[in-house]
Amino acid sequence: MDIDECVVFALGKAYQQVHGELKRRLKSVGLTVPQYSVLAGLWEQDGRTAAQLCERLVMDSATITGVLDRLERAGLVTRAADDRDRRLVRLRLTPRGAALREEVDRTVAELNEQILRPFGPQETERLYAGLRAMAKGEQ
């Protein structure tokens, strides 16, 4: 098989391009891609536990812990024991962490728009459906 006909190769190259561009754009706001992912999970639902974030973002606990440590040092996230169950640690956005959302959402939306520009609405939906199926292992 010619390498240009290999889906895995094509997906890998596409990933390299879009991930690299996201990395570059997030750097301008002082975030890494994993930090963005964790913040996005908390913007979606503040007060999650690390385990809930791991499940939502499909990240391992060691990765989440390191990212949370850096976000906490940067003053974007805090950790606090749950009011009802002291065994649980809740992750909360600081005002600074919450304030980043608008700029970061705009940055990511602009990149999404750029990536999807060549596709029509039906092609875009098929692309998303295919990517979601692959991510779930339904190919």
Image (spheres, grey):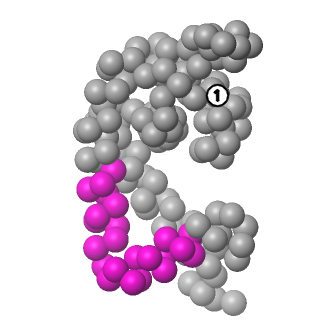
Q: In the structure shown, which secondary structural element does the residue marked by tag 1 occupy?
A: helix
Residue 63 in view here? no
From the top left corner, tell me how far across and down residue 42 is, in percent. Answer: 48, 33
Left-right relation of 80 to 120: right
Residue at image location 70% in from the left, 9% down from the top:
86
Left-right relation of 91 to 88: left
Q: Is residue 136 above or below residue 74?
A: below
Q: How many other residues sit within 10 Å of disc 1, few (<14), some (14-19) or many (≥20)?
A: many
Magenta span has 79?
A: no
Secondary structure, magenta segment, majority class: helix
Residue 37 in view here? yes
Residue at image location 35% in from the left, 40% down from the top:
26
Q: Which residue is mark 1?
A: 50
Q: Is residue 131 above or below residue 52?
A: below
Say which of 88 and 65 sits in front: 88
Name the quadrant containing residue 1: bottom right
Residues drawn in magenta: 108-131
From the top left corner, tell me how far across and down residue 122 is, in percent. Answer: 39, 84
